[in-house]
Image (spheres, rainbow, N blue to C red):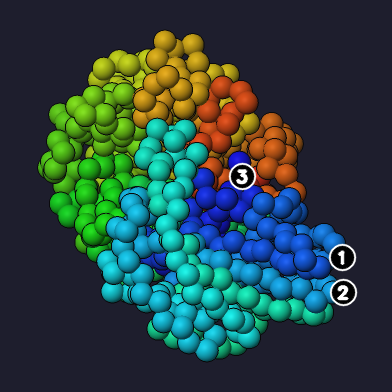
Amino acid sequence: MREWIVTNGLGGYASLTHCQKNTSKFHGLLVASLRPPTERWVFVSNVYDIVQVDGQSFNLNDMQSEFVFNVFPSFVFNFNNILIKKTIFMPYGKNTTVIKFEVSTKKPISIYHSPVINSRHFYELSNPGSVSFEQNMFEHGVFIRPSNIDKTLKIMLKDSKYNSDGYWRKYYYKKDHERQDSYLDNNFHLGEFCKNISGTGEYFFVMSIEDIIDADLSYMYSREMLRKKTIFEKTEIPYKYEKLVLSTDDFIVKKGKNQSIIAGYHWFGDWGRDTLISLPGTTLVTKRFQDAKNILKCFGGYIRKGLVPNVFSDKDSSASYNTVDSSLWFIDRVFQYLKYTDDTDFLTEMWGELTSIIDNYRGGTDYCIQMDQDYLISHGPGLTWMDVKIGDYYPTPRANKAVEIQALWYNALRIMSNFTNILGKDDDYFDLSNQVKESFNMQYDQLYDVIDKKDQTIRPNQIFLVSLDYSMINQPLQEEIIKNIESKLITPFGLRTLNPEHPDYKGNYIGMHNRDIAYHNGTVWPWLLGPFVHSFIRLKKYEQYWRTYAYEHFLKTMFDAFGDQWDGSIHEIFDGSPPYIPRGCITQAWSVAEILRCLVEDIENIRPPFEKMVLSSKIRA
């Protein structure tokens, strides 16, 4: 069942299915972020709307509606000469959800709105009576104080009458049950708001934990519409990409005095790897350069022992550093930022963080990450993006010398060499990069996934030997990798994580196995289409014919499947075998970002304005 989402730039969101149902513990109309962008808390699960006319009652939550997406999700109901359009939005930077109702009726009608509330972390579930709710009415609504948190929920509807009530009701979350997750919850049903309408007009139903709420709700809606439209217009890219551009805005969030990127909705927080892989598509092709700078400064400030954090806990925002690739992506993303801005002052500002990464990888840091005697990077288990662990078992064992880590290591050294030339510093990196390249090519006599283990398992990680700016392999080998991936791994929705002919291949994410076993053993990941399409087109010298070919063969089928009412979201993963059922998060930052980036930079060939200058490493200090 399809789902929709709107967000608030803090990590908070509103999200239900297209049928306005709660099928997951993560669904809700007001899921607030109490420590942006983490500590997400469910305050409002849903609102039930009942229309009374001529003695008849019509429950809008059970009626068939037309789902329409135009910047925000809307539901259109047409019955008994009554037309109702229900639109959901969140004002930017506020833990507030507003439902806009546009009503046209020839008869007097009454609409009753019954909120269903809770007070819990979005990972958890509630029991009846686990929390109590104190209700206090005011002129246009009701204040609700949960007993388990020092927050006040305000629910408001001007020119209405609120009838106080309250009872618990059990909820079954079908999607969570299918995911083998906890799925039985209890929500608290409040009383009802009654709104009488006798003609054509609009009104706003507000749910918020903010102390101050803008009194002019119509202006609030117009302001948020304008903000969204301005985001797209600033990009100056073709209109057909508007939905993807607006979707990237869902992920850029406040984090302290800086910003970050939410990895995916509903349940992910901000992850270092996901943030950095997503950064070009969310902030550079969209010309949000200050946001890009803020995000890089944010993660640069967290670097410890040369490591960028892997993840921040949603419950207390504590950082974990168990990643080998995030720091190398950090160097690359500073490079991509320079291609768009030529901001050498920022490069100077980040120099200490950049050099600390290389120094720690050379000398050795946590998690057994170190440059080995062969100049390649060795690392512990579960540190690459294929990082799933079940107890002490790694379903995708890639410890020691994973292929993409070597590609990122060489790329980072060449970038640092480039940076020293730009800033007029001594180059301590170029000679080392040549040693890495020579050592790698001596060992890479087959298409290995893990170099030292001579693991020839066909996985998509070899694509990074081709897609990064600096590749240490020759063109014939790059072309062999592209052909190998195209024949074994590509699907209409992304790249499989394992060759279907392998005995460990799992074609379905959900099945008679732990879903984490399938996560990187066949499951399709859309974000990998970005580096694949880039590699394919770059090897074809960006010729128009091949750019059109790449779109038609690798991307178009996915967009056709999404349909006209698609909102720009792209799932985290899909099943590896037909019919490629979407799974995981309903929208993932690197899925959206890498698809948008490759459409703009590669399919449209709109290259970064300072790319040639930065690649030439001309001194500009």
Q: Residue at x 60, y 68 (%)?
A: 113
* Identity, as a three-letter code, of the amino acid under mark 3: Arg
Q: Which mark is residue 2?
A: 3
Residue name at image x 20 percent, y 33 percent: 379
Q: Is residue 457 left or right of residue 454?
A: right
Q: Are marks 1 and 2 in contact (CB under 8 Å)?
A: yes
Q: Counting residues from the N terminus, which is met first, the one under dot 1 or under dot 3?
A: 3
Q: Earlier in the sequence, mark 1 or mark 2?
A: 1
The numbered mark at residue 106 is: 2
Give the alpha-carbon distance from disc 3 to disc 2, as whole Å: 33 Å
- Say few, some or many: other residues with alpha carbon within 10 Å of mark 3 (under 14 / 14 to 19 / 20 or more): few
Q: Is residue 111 left or right of residue 494?
A: right
In x, y percent, where is residue 48? 59, 61
Residue 304 seen anywhere in this rendered image of the structure: yes
* Amino acid tagged 1: Asn
Q: Amino acid at mark 2?
A: Lys
Residue on which the image places disc 1: 81
Label 1, secondary structure: give it.
Answer: loop
Residue 294: quadrant of the picture: bottom left
Q: Secondary structure at mark 3?
A: loop
